[in-house]
Amino acid sequence: MATSRTEQRRQTEQRILSAARRLFSERGYERTTIRAVATEAAADPGLVMRYFESKEGLFSQVARIDMDAEASIDGSPAEVADTLLASLRDKLVTEPEAALALLRSMLTHPEASREVHAYVSAQQRRMTEALPQDNAALRADLLGAVMLGTLIGRYLIRMEALQDAPAEEISALLSPCFQALAGGAPKDVHATEPDEQAPAG
Amino acid sequence: MATSRTEQRRQTEQRILSAARRLFSERGYERTTIRAVATEAAADPGLVMRYFESKEGLFSQVARIDMDAEASIDGSPAEVADTLLASLRDKLVTEPEAALALLRSMLTHPEASREVHAYVSAQQRRMTEALPQDNAALRADLLGAVMLGTLIGRYLIRMEALQDAPAEEISALLSPCFQALAGGAPKDVHATEPDEQAPAG
DNA sequence: GTCTATAACGAGATAGAC
DNA sequence: GTCTATCTCGTTATAGAC
């Protein structure tokens, strides 16, 4: 017998999670209803509640991102910039659906906001340690803001050119930007005249 | 007498608008209720409906941004970058509450999304015309994404360092970033005048 | 009579009883 | 696993104040 009760239940749970991931990332927390998730998963609304306790519980399950999976951030400023850029490129290559569920709701849902805040804070702290400048914390925040803006533009707002561009082209354009923010020397600039670039401080 | 009936009404309308602006920008569209706006404005929920037709109508009134007020975008890539940076710095100096109402809801409310999309598209088109490169459209989108990310980080997500930093410091750090994205030569000037264009080299 | 406040309606949500 | 009570929302009718 292929489908025991527990197996059946596990499958239903998976269908619900998958449906929730899709709807939360497409519509955000508020506009996603338990009913819609249930319909999408061919299950009963009550079941969703039973399995995940509440709408909040379902969202938590969906939007949990493991910070530990992120690459560690260290080395010279230029290396930090490269690491971050590589991390961003990853997310530009394959759409990070679970993360999008979180991003989509971060401006309007308190828990999503907290979750994102915790994530960027952690990342920020690691970067701040790696960047030697006195204004390292601000530089780290700006790096985070640029990454956030890029992901929002591509996946959530769907800016046309940004949505269609290959990941490599985006990261190539962003590279000098990251280098500058990290405080390293901008390397592959399409500049006609490489001027001196000492940060005023 | 200071408060005639129409004057009284005008004041109530203003209180409602002000309350709505605050609540929409703090909580976003979905989590802002007509009732809460009315309470905040010391008015009646029915009045809000009567004055503004519907919740959508109220939001439209609050979130209307005049694109014409934006500075025109032209000149060399370096000048384009400077213009954009100046525009961003403006918004970093004084918190643009009405725009924040729109930004806060852009990821979860369809009309807010459309409004923002129209805005960035218009800006994008003007920039694309000004930037000579073949990948101008993508560069324009990225410039927009960086500005968006910066505003979100400072006002909506409230990244700590970014929230507290003076506008000049932020724009100084962002300047080479903008220059690189616009395709001009990175330069280390931090101008205080929007019109100021330092002669490079 | 116009403008404002109170009350009620129906839709749709979550969550807990069966 | 299903059904239904309760809550809150946006909105509309109704009664009262100027």
Image: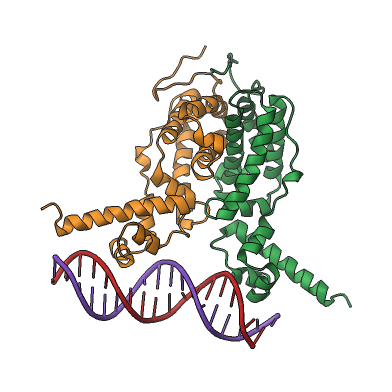
Chain colours: A green, B orange, C red, D purple
Identity of the residue drawn at 72% across and 36% down: A86
Q: Quadrant of the N terminus of chain A?
A: bottom right
User: Where does the image place residue A138, in percent across and percent down from the top left?
Assistant: 57, 31
Residue B201, position as x, y percentages in the image: 52, 11
On screen, A73 above or below A47?
above
Is residue B168 at all visible to an observer of this figure?
yes
Q: Is residue B183 left or right of residue B5?
A: right
Point 59% across, 42% down: residue = A148
- On screen, residue B195 above or below B35: above
Task: Tell me the quadrant of the picture where the C terminus of chain A can be found.
Answer: top right
Q: Work out whether residue A103 can be spotted.
A: no
Which image quadrant is residue D4 in? bottom right
In this rendered view, identify the residue nearer to me: A19 or B9.
B9
Who is closer to the viewer here, B190 or A56?
Answer: A56
Question: Is A6 displayed left or right of A177 in the figure?
Answer: right
Residue with the most extreme top position? B201
Residue B127 spot, x, y in % from top left: 47, 34
Taking the image as shown, residue A83 lies to the left or right of residue B5, namely: right
Residue with the most extreme left position? B1
